[in-house]
Image (cartoon, rainbow, N blue to C red):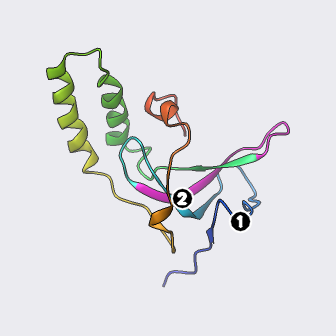
Amino acid sequence: MTGHIKIIDLENDLIPELGNKKDTFRSKQVFRCPVCTSLTNNIEIRGGFKGWRASPFPICPHREQEWHVLLRVKIRLSDPAHPVSYRKELEVEIDSLRLNAKDDISGSADLSCERKFPATKLIIEDRGYD
């Protein structure tokens, strides 16, 4: 039997005071991963040092899986500077890898409240978010 999941509305509720960085909670809003396109409402607390307030940050459920890392690389390689035929091959590979993505939504999240991941460019450029 699953316990009750508290859902936090990031626009109207206070962000919970969690004990440590990397603590997580679920939000009413859902976020689409710019890499694999899966939806999640799993939020992690980031930052909160030297006077900076900790910030909520959505985390992709697949971020540590090998196919997700490979997908990030292929997205970077699909740069317009490459020949069209090469980019088309990459698009096929990208679409194939995205078939592995499964949504990670718990509780009563509102799918009409879909948001973009923050710092999308950093995630795709593989500067990390782990």
Query: Judging from the image, what secondary structure is the residue with disc 1 in?
Result: loop
Percent across and percent down for residue 121 are 49, 31
Q: Are marks 2 and 1 in contact (CB under 8 Å)?
A: no
Q: Would residue 65 appear left or right of 29 to someone viewing this image?
A: left
Q: Nearer the viewer, residue 114 or 92?
A: 114
Percent across and percent down for residue 40 are 46, 58
Residue segment shown in magenta: 39-53
**Residue at x 17%, y 28% (from the top left corner):** 88
Please, what is the dominant secondary structure of the magenta stretch? strand
Judged by depth in the image, the label closer to the viewer, 2 or 1, is: 1
Residue 83 covered by magenta stretch = no
**Residue at x 38%, y 60% (from the top left corner):** 103
When the figure is inspected, residue 14 is found, relative to residue 53, above or below; the finding is below
Q: Nearer the viewer, residue 60 or 1?
A: 60
| Residue hosting label 1 | 13
Residue type beneath disc 2: Asn
Question: What is the number of the mark on residue 42?
Answer: 2
